[in-house]
Image (cartoon, helix red, strand yellow):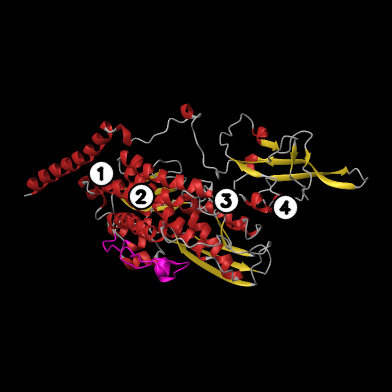
């Protein structure tokens, strides 16, 4: 039976999940080959939401291309924009004021919490619990309101600009964030009550979608999907950017490598993000929020790479510049694409009912995979 | 032994379900914890953040004057061609030709609210408005002319 996995033989049942399916959270199309209830093969078919973002960016200037990256991984758009701003600053050697750096890190961590909240809600919904979705959105709404006040948008902020941030913090920002922290600390115990401590939930997650550390690395997994297998891969720790090397926080690691380990990584990561925000919220330095930059940004001739840790893993931008105002070639390394490629390996040999539990913990955002 | 474990599992599952349901009951009886907003009914009291990016507008003063010089900085800054500046030549009292805007066409259907035109504008002629109910029956209604009929440039704006 085991050697048959990965092949199609006569009498196999082929099921299409998606591109319109509630469990795929987007236009992901999975072609699943089944033998009875056992999954033999999962083939993801991509391209339903391909917008050729990389090609689009080649015709945009270094100020304009930032907004497009909000439309890739829309749940961590701040962090994507952050990478775009960082690579331009790296290439042009722009010094970012300390206030802007702290604001950026604060916004990144708020985005990470918001993203994990949404993931937690939809993950529980995939497994049949509908209530957690509303609980997660309640806390996420508080973050969205903070974002709306300071950045002017709730999802696609476009707040990071080369040299700093678009606008100074709203006067209410600190108070609102502190309110959010106390709300979060009050409500996080509910998460354990409703979902994490639930035996039915644990039984569906434990031992499902196991991937070894070696396999996860060879598939190019990153972020919580790799840290669930016990590999240290947090870009904030390995290649610190901005002020992450001066902040105290732990890299969350779990060793089991199954769905529940990846679930716990994300839950514990939210607490670490809260810890980062608590350290910074009272210590925002005074000063400019944006460095003085030239009106026209030109990257010097050469190749540049910048990576950041988004809520889903390592997000990288590679730019080849010819010295002009537009990138000559741009390549995005999105975490979702590599994480999805491990799904086939995880799912082979398990039952079809567990597929949702694996897909959920990979935290797939389809526009991020397709670009 | 299998039977014992099975029954244990069932009881544990029921117990954790009861813990979850306790939370549901808590919210069922504590109405103050509910934060849902009744959107279309609360329109009168709905408050949007001052910086909320809803659409680009051009403020006019009481004399129907705006601050736009027609420099096309916004048009160049826009990543999607949302703004088109149509210029004309006005005659000044001294008989000189002066460039002015005829129409500032704004395609709301293409706009991504990235705020680049606002930052690019050297004379603060345009700003973001906090409107958000943009639904219309036909997309041609989303193409707007931002300067009002018969408006002209404010004194002293270069």
Q: What is the x, y in percent for residue A227?
A: 34, 63
- C-alpha gap between disc 4 and disc 2: 45 Å
Q: Is residue B132 found inside the magenta-colored segment of the image?
A: no
Establish if B151 lies above or below A274.
above
Q: What is the x, y in percent for residue A356?
A: 34, 47
Parent chain of label 3 = A
Dot 3 or dot 1, earlier in sequence: 3
Q: Do the residues at pointers 2 and 3 share their chain?
A: yes
Q: Which of A71 and A6 is in front in this view?
A: A71
Which circle marks residue A194 in the picture?
A: 1
Which residue range is magenta in the image? A228-257
- C-alpha gap between disc 1 and disc 4: 54 Å
Query: Disc 4 designates what residue?
Result: B73
Left or right of B58: which side holds A145? left
Kindly give the residue lying farthest to the right in the view shown. B95
Kindly give the residue lying farthest to the top in the view shown. B41
Parent chain of label 1 = A
Q: Do the residues at pointers 3 and 1 share their chain?
A: yes
- C-alpha gap between disc 2 and disc 3: 24 Å
Parent chain of label 2 = A
Q: Is mark 2 on a helix, strand or loop?
A: helix
Q: Residue at x 47, y 63 (%)?
A: A308
Q: Is mark 3 on a helix, strand or loop?
A: loop
Foreground mark, 3 or 1?
1
Dot 2 or dot 3, earlier in sequence: 3
């Amino acid at each position: 039976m085991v050697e048959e996995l990965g092949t199609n033989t006569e009498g196999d049942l082929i099921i299409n999940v998606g591109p319109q399916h509630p469990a795929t959270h987007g236009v992901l199309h999975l072609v699943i080959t089944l033998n009875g209830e056992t999954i033999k093969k999962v083939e993801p078919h991509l391209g339903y939401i391909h917008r050729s973002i990389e090609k689009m960016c080649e015709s945009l200037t270094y100020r304009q291309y930032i907004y497009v990256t909000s439309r890739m991984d829309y749940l961590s758009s701040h962090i994507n924009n952050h990478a775009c701003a960082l690579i331009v600053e790296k290439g042009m050697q722009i010094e970012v004021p300390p206030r802007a750096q702290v604001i950026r890190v604060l916004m990144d961590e708020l985005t990470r919490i918001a993203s994990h909240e949404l993931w937690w809600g939809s993950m529980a919904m995939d497994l049949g619990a509908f209530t957690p979705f509303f609980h997660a959105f309640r806390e996420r709404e508080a973050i969205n309101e903070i974002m709306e006040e300071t950045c002017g948008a709730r999802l696609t902020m476009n707040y990071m600009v080369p040299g700093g941030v678009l606008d100074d913090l709203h006067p209410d920002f600190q108070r609102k964030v502190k309110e959010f922290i106390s709300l979060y600390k009050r409500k996080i115990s509910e998460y354990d009550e409703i979902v994490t401590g639930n035996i039915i939930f644990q039984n569906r997650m434990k031992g499902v979608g196991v991937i070894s550390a070696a396999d996860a690395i060879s598939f190019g997994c990153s972020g919580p999907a790799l840290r669930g297998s016990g590999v240290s891969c947090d870009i904030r720790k390995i290649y610190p950017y901005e002020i992450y090397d001066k902040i105290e926080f732990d890299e969350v690691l779990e060793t089991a490598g199954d769905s529940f380990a990846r679930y716990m990584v994300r839950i514990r990561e939210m607490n670490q993000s809260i810890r980062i925000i608590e350290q910074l919220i009272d210590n925002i330095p005074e000063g400019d929020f944006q460095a003085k930059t030239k009106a026209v940004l030109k990257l010097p001739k050469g190749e540049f790479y910048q990576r950041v840790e988004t809520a889903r893993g390592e997000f990288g931008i590679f730019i080849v510049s010819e010295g002009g105002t537009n990138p000559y070639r741009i390549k995005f390394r999105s975490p979702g694409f590599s994480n999805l490629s491990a799904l086939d390996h995880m799912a082979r040999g398990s039952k079809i009912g567990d597929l949702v539990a694996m897909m959920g913990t990979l935290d797939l955002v389809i526009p991020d995979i397709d670009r | 032994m299998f039977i014992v474990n099975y029954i244990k599992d069932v009881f544990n599952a029921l117990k954790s379900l009861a813990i979850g349901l306790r939370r549901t009951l808590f919210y069922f009886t504590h109405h103050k914890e509910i934060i849902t907003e009744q959107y279309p009914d609360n329109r009168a009291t709905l408050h949007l953040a001052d910086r909320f990016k809803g659409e680009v507008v051009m403020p006019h003063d009481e004399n129907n004057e705006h601050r736009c010089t027609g420099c096309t900085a916004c048009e160049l800054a826009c990543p999607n061609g949302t703004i088109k500046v149509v210029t004309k030549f006005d005659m000044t009292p001294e008989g000189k030709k002066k460039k002015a805007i005829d129409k500032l066409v704004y395609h709301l259907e293409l706009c991504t609210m990235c705020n680049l035109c606002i930052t690019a504008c050297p004379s603060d002629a345009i700003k973001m408005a906090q409107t958000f109910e943009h639904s219309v029956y036909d997309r041609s209604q989303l193409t707007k002319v931002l300067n009002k009929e018969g408006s002209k440039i404010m004194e002293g704006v270069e």
